[in-house]
Image (cartoon, coloured by chain):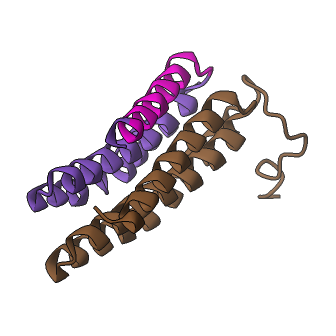
Chain colours: A purple, B brown
Amino acid sequence: MIVVLVALLALASVFSMLRCLRGPDWTDRIMTFDLLNNILVAAAALYAIYNNNADVVTLVLVLAPMSFISNAIMAFYLERRKEP
Amino acid sequence: MSVLVMSLLLIGCLLILLASVGSLKLPDTLTRMAAVSKASTLGSVIFCLAAALHFQRISLTVLLVLAALVLFMGIPVSSHLLSRLRLRTARKYPLQTQRNDFETDGR
């Protein structure tokens, strides 16, 4: 069962990396950070549940604001650029 | 692991896979952003709910509810910032939508 869940998450990350490689605009690439960060949160929760290890739950709390911070900073610097 | 936690994990994995397939197959930046920002956020929040149901400790539940609140608040704001940025470069890479309310809004 755990193999199926990890395989689904790995397939999702491969698809988002393909979009990150292919995307025609910079916003397409930044958008995939969001998806990859959500996959990381899911993987941390899955590791904590499967190994019955309660310390890893803190990692979820650390990873949760990361997508907002990275996307906001990237949007800020792309908006300051002169002519896209 | 109980059956409830297992089914929640499976639902979360399928939602995240659906979001990534949507980000790969949809034709436009704004539709891709809609698919990613809604479905994957719901998937990770379902994972947080599954972890809270598995451990059943009050301190971990508080931490996971805080993480879910941060996810629910942060991702729409950053997605809105990115879609505003995308509409500014709509001439170089054209969008599928014909009308652009962002340009005629300030007049």
Q: Residue furthest right?
A: B98
Residue B86 % position (x, y): 64, 38
* Magenta stretch: dominant secondary structure: helix
Q: As displayed, is residue A10 above or below residue B39?
A: above
Q: Residue B49 in magenta? A: no
The N terminus of chain B: image quadrant: bottom left
Residue at the image point whose x is 75% and y is 30% from the top:
B27
Q: Which residues are magenta?
A: A4-24
Q: Nearer the viewer, residue A53 or B3?
A: B3
Residue B63 % position (x, y): 22, 72
> Going by the image, does B97 lie left or right of A46?
right
Q: Nearer the viewer, residue B90 or A49?
A: A49
Residue at the image point whose x is 51% and y is 55% from the top:
B11
Question: Number of marks in the image?
Answer: 0
Q: As displayed, is residue A21 above or below residue A73?
A: above
The C terminus of chain B: image quadrant: bottom right
Residue B31 % position (x, y): 71, 42
Residue B45 placement: quadrant: bottom left
Q: Residue furthest top?
A: A22
Q: Nearer the viewer, residue A26 or B67?
A: B67
Residue A33 placement: quadrant: top left
Residue A39 placement: quadrant: top left
> Going by the image, does B72 lie left or right of A44?
right
Residue at the image point whose x is 45% and y is 66% from the top:
B72
Residue B87 % position (x, y): 69, 41
Residue at the image point whose x is 65% and y is 39% from the top:
B32
Q: As displayed, is residue B13 above or below residue B70?
A: above
Q: Residue A8 in magenta? A: yes
Say whether residue B55 is visible. yes
Q: Nearer the viewer, residue A3 or A72?
A: A3
